[in-house]
């Protein structure tokens, strides 16, 4: 387990996957909650709520995938824990986020929800397919799983002083 993290990668991935779904949290909340667990940030109902609006690519608009946005919040928390100086924290955060999104884009060929899941969530049909078609059966569950796994590595780098 990387230095500074409170759980192994598999545990973080399982947490994100367990939380995700139509009866649970959205993709962004799930990934952020799992990141907070890995960082040892006390469970707080406000923390996942910060990422609620990221679901469906920023309020169901299909823009940047909510899982990636939740991960970005986790990166920000990690750099906040790892660096006291604001200028240093800002630089590490921007660098880590840019590299993380590059890895996401390389893996998924896009960072946009609509391009990844293939649903137009701005339409009643797309939203119905998401909500009643089984979100865990969509690519979304795979994105949450892989994003949490990628994020665990990034959090480990940040906490050990090797961000990016």
Image (cartoon, rainbow, N blue to C red):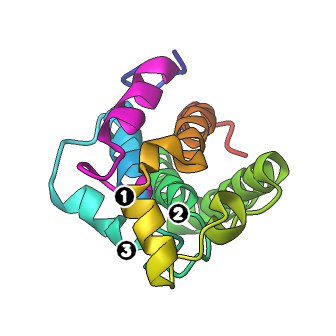
Q: Residues within 10 Å of mark 1 (few under 14, many from 20)?
A: few
Residue 69's tag is 2
Q: Are marks 1 and 2 in contact (CB under 8 Å)?
A: no
Assign the magenta stretch its main secondary structure.
helix
The disc, 3 or 2, on the residue closer to the chain's N-terminal end is: 3
The disc, 1 or 2, on the residue closer to the chain's N-terminal end is: 2
Q: In the structure shown, which secondary structural element does the residue marked by tag 2 occupy? A: helix
Residue shown at the point (57%, 57%) measured from the top left? 68
Q: Which residues are magenta?
A: 9-27
Q: Is residue 154 left or right of residue 126?
A: right
Residue 53's tag is 3
Q: Mark 1 = which residue?
A: 132
Is residue 145 placed above or below 46 in the rendered structure? above
Q: Position of residue 137 (x, y in %)?
A: 50, 42
Is residue 80 placed above or below 163 in the rendered structure? below
Q: Residues within 10 Å of mark 2 (few under 14, many from 20)?
A: many
Q: Is residue 161 magenta?
A: no
Q: Position of residue 83 (x, y in %)?
A: 50, 51
Is residue 96 placed above or below 40 in the rendered structure? below
Q: Residues within 10 Å of mark 3 (few under 14, many from 20)?
A: some
Q: CA distance from mark 3 to mark 1?
A: 20 Å
Q: Is residue 130 left or right of residue 157?
A: left
Q: In the structure shown, which secondary structural element does the residue marked by tag 1 occupy? A: helix
Q: Is residue 105 left or right of residue 131?
A: right
């Amino acid at each position: 387990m990387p230095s500074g993290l409170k759980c192994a990668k598999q545990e973080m991935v399982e947490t994100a996957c367990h939380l995700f779904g139509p009866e649970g949290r959205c993709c962004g909340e799930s990934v952020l909650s799992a990141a907070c667990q890995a960082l040892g940030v006390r469970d707080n109902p406000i923390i996942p709520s910060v990422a609620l609006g990221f679901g469906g690519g920023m309020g169901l608009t299909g823009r940047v995938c909510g899982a990636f946005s939740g991960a970005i919040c986790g990166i920000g928390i990690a750099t906040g824990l790892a660096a006291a100086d604001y200028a240093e924290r800002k630089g590490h955060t921007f660098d880590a986020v840019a590299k993380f999104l590059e890895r996401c884009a390389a893996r998924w060929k896009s960072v946009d929800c609509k391009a990844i899941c293939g649903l137009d969530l701005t339409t009643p049909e797309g939203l119905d397919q998401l909500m009643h078609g089984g979100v865990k059966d969509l690519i979304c569950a795979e994105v949450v799983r892989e994003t949490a796994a990628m994020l665990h590595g990034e959090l480990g780098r940040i906490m050990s002083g090797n961000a990016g």
